[in-house]
Amino acid sequence: MSFEIPESVKVWSQFFHPVLMWVLLALTLYSAYLGVQWRRARNAEGDAKKELLKGKFNTRHYQMGSILLALMILGTIGGMGVTYLNNGKLFVGSHLLAGLGMAGLIATSASLSPYMQKGNEWARSAHIALNTILTGIFFWQAVTGVQIVQRIISKM
């Protein structure tokens, strides 16, 4: 006995991954903003520091990072799953490989949190570098993802 996915589900499921990833790109930029604000707060002095600390940027950045980590990994797996269900195979190309690389980068970046909490500057520098690279790849992924969506729509 085999399980057949209804055609309407197969068609519309192809758009969940791209929409999620565009939302995650926006949240990535917001998380970067929170991270920059937290760094400013850590380096500030006097009244400026007190004012910046009221924003709780450290907590908000950490929470946003946790959400991004979970949704990016699940979105990556989901995109691959939908592609496989709709096509019976994965298309191994630059979009897939870069997406897998992004999943690795965000996981590695998040794994530095305990070291950053202990004040290790090397971990902060690595975290910033990894996330800068991740964000650059993410913008490129957005462009290639739009190209893939355009191909899907043209076949409908």
Image (cartoon, helix red, strand yellow):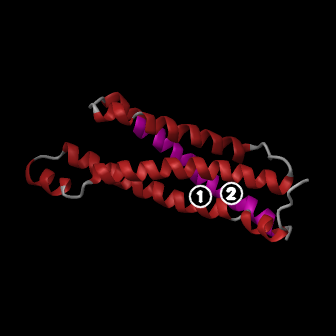
Query: Around disc 1, counting alpha carbons within 10 Å, would you say few (fewer than 14), some (14 to 19), or many (20 or more)?
Result: many
Disc 1, SS: helix
Say which of 36 and 7 sits in front: 7
* Quarter of image, res 48: bottom left
- Separation of disc 2 and disc 1 at Cα? 9 Å
Q: Which mark is residue 21?
A: 1
Name the main secondary structure of what is drawn in magenta.
helix
Q: Amino acid at mark 2?
A: Gly
State the mark number for residue 145: 2
Q: Is residue 144 magenta?
A: yes
| Image x and y of residue 99, in percent | 64, 45
Instruction: State the residue lying farthest toward the right.
Output: 1
Q: x%, y% of residue 50? A: 12, 53
Using the image, tell me which numbered label, if any, was put on residue 51.
none
Which residues are the magenta region?
Answer: 127-153
User: If you read the primary sequence from the N terminus, does the residue marked by circle 2 or circle 1 appear first?
Assistant: 1
Answer yes or no: do the residues labelled 2 and 1 have beta carbons within 8 Å? yes
- In this rendering, the label closer to the viewer, 2 or 1: 1
Q: Position of residue 21 (x, y in %)?
A: 59, 58
